[in-house]
Image (tube, rainbow, N blue to C red):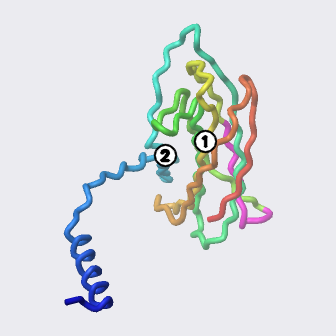
């Protein structure tokens, strides 16, 4: 006795479906992405902090590079929100630089911060300016395969006279080239509150 072709195809389909459901794949563990750089701004205290990277301790050796310089940041702030009378605008910058090992979340170099208060433009009270300067001196091991650079973060907030953060912004730039040793490098950024 022979089965009709349609019935054979249907029986094979059911059998293969049952076989597929009966199989279990081996458990696969997906690696977690590294935590990466995380920036936080404590506006009442003017502190900009970074986590997620480890600073690598580098002793001075014959194979070390020492780099120095100054980073100057001009931050132009467009005051769009309605702020209470007496609001101040704390601002801060953070510079992370040297040899950047993103795969292992390490920096062979240093991290610097500076903070201040933005000045509201008397002629145009809907704008403010924050000028900050960070001198740095970092030592790191010479490694021809490592990439060097700077990561900058900046923050500004509207702080009420009672110390409450009414509005804030924190921004992180991409990786910029590490300036030549001894150089003063200027960056200009725009922000809105």
Query: Residue 65, position in %: x, y?
Result: 62, 17
Is 120 or 135 nearer to us in this picture? 135
Instruction: State which region is magenta.
Output: 123-133
Q: Say if 82 sits above or below 115 in the image.
A: below
Q: Say if 156 sits above or below 187 in the image.
A: below
Q: Residues within 10 Å of mark 1 (few under 14, many from 20)?
A: some
Give the secondary structure at mark 2: loop
Q: Residue at x 37, y 50 (%)?
A: 32
Quadrant housing the N terminus: bottom left
Q: Quick check: 86 left or right of 47?
A: right
Inter-mark Cα distance, 1 to 2 = 10 Å
Q: Residue at x 63, y 47 (%)?
A: 174
- Which residue is most to the top? 62
**130 drawn magenta:** yes
Is 17 or 43 nearer to us in this picture? 17
Q: Residue at x 27, y 85 (%)?
A: 8
Q: Which residue is mark 2?
A: 37
Q: Which residue is mark 1?
A: 151
Q: Residue at x 65, y 22 (%)?
A: 67
Q: Are marks 1 and 2 in contact (CB under 8 Å)?
A: yes
Query: Residue 156, position in %: x, y?
Result: 59, 55
Query: Residue 173, position in %: x, y?
Result: 63, 49
Q: Classify residue 150 by image quadrant.
A: top right
Give the secondary structure at mark 1: strand
Count of marks overlaid on the render:
2
Q: Residues within 10 Å of mark 2 (few under 14, many from 20)?
A: some
């Amino acid at each position: 006795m022979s089965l009709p072709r349609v019935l054979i195809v249907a029986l094979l389909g059911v059998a293969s479906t049952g076989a597929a459901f009966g199989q279990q794949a081996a458990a696969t563990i997906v690696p977690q992405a590294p935590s990466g750089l995380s920036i936080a701004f404590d506006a009442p205290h003017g502190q900009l902090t970074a986590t997620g990277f480890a600073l690598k301790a580098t002793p001075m050796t014959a194979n070390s590079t020492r780099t120095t310089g100054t980073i100057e940041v001009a931050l132009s702030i467009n005051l769009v929100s309605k702020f209470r009378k007496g609001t101040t605008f704390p601002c801060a910058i953070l510079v992370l630089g040297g040899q950047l090992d993103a795969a292992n979340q390490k920096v062979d170099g240093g991290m610097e911060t500076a903070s201040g208060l933005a000045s509201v433009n008397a002629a145009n009270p809907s704008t403010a300016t924050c000028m900050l300067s960070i001198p740095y001196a970092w030592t790191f091991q010479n490694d021809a395969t490592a990439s060097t650079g700077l990561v900058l973060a900046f923050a500004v907030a509207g702080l009420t006279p009672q110390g409450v953060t009414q509005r804030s912004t924190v921004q992180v730039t991409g990786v910029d080239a590490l300036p030549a040793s001894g150089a003063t490098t200027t960056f200009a950024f725009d922000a809105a509150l």
